[in-house]
Amino acid sequence: MGYKNSSHFSHDQADKVGLIITNLGTPKAPKTTELRTYLRQFLSDPRVVEFPRLLWWLILNLIILRIRPSRSAKAYQSVWTEQGSPLAIYTEKQAKALEQALKKEWGDTLVVDWAMRYGEPSVEQCIQKMMERGVRKLLVMPLYPQYSGSTVGSTFDALASDFTTRRWIPELRFITHYHDFPPYIDALANSIKEYWNEHGRPQKIIFSYHGVPLRYLHNGDPYHCQCHKTSRLLADALEITKDEYLTTFQSRFGREPWLQPYTDHTLESLPGKGIKSIQVVCPGFSADCLETIEEIGMENRDIFMEAGGEQFAYIPALNDSKHHINALQALAQKHLQGWEPHQQDDIPARAEAAMHHPHNQKT
């Protein structure tokens, strides 16, 4: 078996520290063919769909991939920009802003890049770029504040799978969650307060998180608990009472029970209870994407307004805002401790030893 190497490896290359931020992924274009490729990779992941493999393969290939890609393509067309997918645009901006923020302390010894779990740039492509640049210590930061096996766990799977193919494996640190990290809570609270200062406050604010099947909770996944803790800490930071906010779950798929209450059902019921003015924020999404812009900002807005609602607003994700970059910088610094830049005195000796290996000497 051959292992992956750096194409221009040299023993006198300076060692660097790498930071990769990751997110879920996006198709290359809002077209049916591209969505079919993307959805096949996404829905084939056993972390995403925990179902008997053979049966699921039949369902996926004979039913879902024949129907869903065209529907999803239409949804993506409604959020696509001239620059491309919002999720890819924001994730790239986050990586660049984070690198700039960390340069003050790290200079050129830290390399920051971004990857997508599904689609491109892939985790494998990103790691290869890191290794080519001399990264020997690697911090991976999945941008999912709350841990779920279907997101963070799957990201680690991709990382581990890639490492099995490499000759030189870097030291690894992996962030599994930051749902209660104070700078993250502060960033969310400041973002909401700024929105309130400009647009006023609603009767009720909805904290909507991506859903997962209910059985994941029963099987030990901490996602549900971490979402509720984020909501509680955020409510405390906003100084609002339990009657002023709700925690709900969106984006369910299939027929089995998912985490409840469901966002769409909740929004449909609120006007009948006298709640005619709401705002929705999605604390589990680090960047705006299909699920926030189209599902919440369009589809769920229509549900609420058609049920008798009068004022609906979606408060944007943190994206590449200063609040968010400051929080991510603090999170990175916390996990980079001990890897600070240092004199690399061993590099000349390492290169000389490689040069004078008996195999390299002329006879």
Image: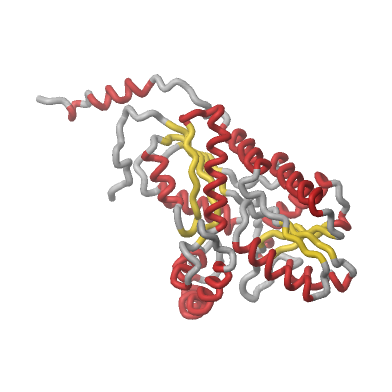
At 56% from the left edge and 33% from the top edge, which residue is drawn? 102
| Residue 11 screen position, x and y as percent | 31, 30
| Residue 357 seen in the current view | yes
Total tally of numbered discs in the picture: 0
288 up-or-down from 190: above or below: below
Which of the pair 324/59 is nearer the observer?
Answer: 324
Dividing the picture into quadrants, the one containing residue 269 is bottom right
163 up-or-down from 205: above or below: above
- In the visual, does 145 lie left or right of 52? right
| Residue 214 seen in the current view | no
Name the colouring of the figure: secondary structure
Quarter of the image that includes the C terminus:
top left
9 up-or-down from 321: above or below: above
| Residue 197 screen position, x and y as percent | 81, 48
Dividing the picture into quadrants, the one containing residue 336 is top right
| Residue 313 screen position, x and y as percent | 76, 61
Which residue is most to the left? 363
At 76% from the left edge and 66% from the top edge, which residue is drawn? 261
- In the visual, does 12 lie left or right of 232? left
| Residue 360 screen position, x and y as percent | 18, 28
At 84% from the left edge and 54% from the top edge, which residue is drawn? 201
164 up-or-down from 276: above or below: above
Which of the pair 209/79 is nearer the observer?
Answer: 79
- In the visual, does 65 lie left or right of 240? left
